[in-house]
Image (cartoon, grey):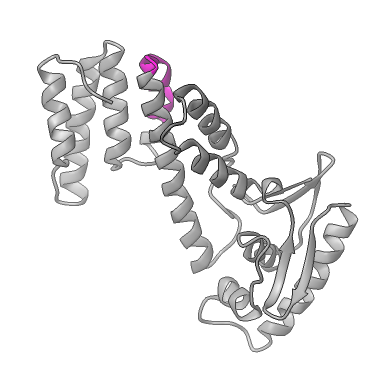
Amino acid sequence: MELRLLGSVEVLAGGRPFSAGPPQQRGVLAAVAVDVGRPVSVDTIVERLWSHNPPNRARAAVYVYISQLRKVLSAAGTSMSLERTSGGYRLDADPDVIDLHRFQGLIAAARWPKRPDGERVQMLQEALGLWCGNVVADLPGDWAAGIRQAYNQLRLDATVLWAQAELRRGNGGAIVATLVGLTGEYPLAESLAAALMRALHASGCSAQALDFYAGLRRRLAERLGTNPSAHLQELHQTILRGEAVAV
């Protein structure tokens, strides 16, 4: 059984998808799933669904959605359950069956400083492999937009951490294509730029690393009116001198 929040909100059991209902009903499921195992008050669910402009009978609508979601989970034969508590509603489930929590847990484990780079790479590859699109991509509203932004940053940080581990293992050439692909999504991310420049330089493509830096400097100036950070400028100078770069 699996509950997917990385991408559209979706319930799967036995490899079969089960519709979680209309957008607001899926929003209720997402609102309790992000805090799996902890009570989420009805007021919090209402705020997550409708921000500061809830309809007149918002609380009554939440109760209806909860009832319908219980039917969905029952029909899917899942071990998940929506429990009423004094503090609101709690989704009882193993966090690992929710892709968002597995994603987050793998990244947290990979960050352990004493983790061997081989294990770190495997964990981060598994985590990044779970990414099927923006978090709760099919849900509207400020709350959904906020968690999308937070998890996009987590994905970026995990990618950079993966790239750094691969560079330490001498695999710079193998990661260039992935990093280049992400620069379209994160065109101003300096941590990603630094990882790509290191990977290009390590794989003998120093001229491309310098070209990429020039493009980033231009984008930063045009869009933000700033220059690359001191760290990135230093990396640029190191590559210009043809020296090895530290990871």
Left or right, residue 67 beside residue 160: right
Task: Indicate the quadrant where residue 183 lies.
Answer: top left
Task: Indicate the quadrant where residue 190 lies.
Answer: top left
Residue at 9% across, 17% down: 241
Left or right, residue 242 beside residue 194: left
Query: Which residue is most to the front?
Result: 114
Residue 75 horizontal/vertical position (percent): 90, 56
Residue at 82% across, 72% down: 67
In the foreground, 28 or 1 = 1
In the foreground, 54 or 235 = 235
Residue at 33% across, 35% down: 192
Queried whether the magenta region covers residue 173, the answer comes back as: yes
Residue 222 horizontal/vertical position (percent): 18, 47
Image quarter hosting the C terminus:
top left
Image label count: 0
Q: Which residues are magenta?
A: 169-181
Residue 93 horizontal/vertical position (percent): 74, 55
Image vertical order of residue 23 relative to residue 60, above or below: above
Left or right, residue 84 beside residue 163: right
Residue at 13% across, 34% down: 233
Queried whether the magenta region covers residue 92, the answer comes back as: no
Residue 103 horizontal/vertical position (percent): 57, 43
Image quarter hosting the N terminus:
top right
Image vertical order of residue 71 relative to residue 182, above or below: below
| Main secondary-structure element of the magenta-colored stretch | helix
Query: Which residue is most to the bottom?
Result: 56
Image vertical order of residue 98 relative to residue 116, above or below: below
Left or right, residue 209 beside residue 166: left
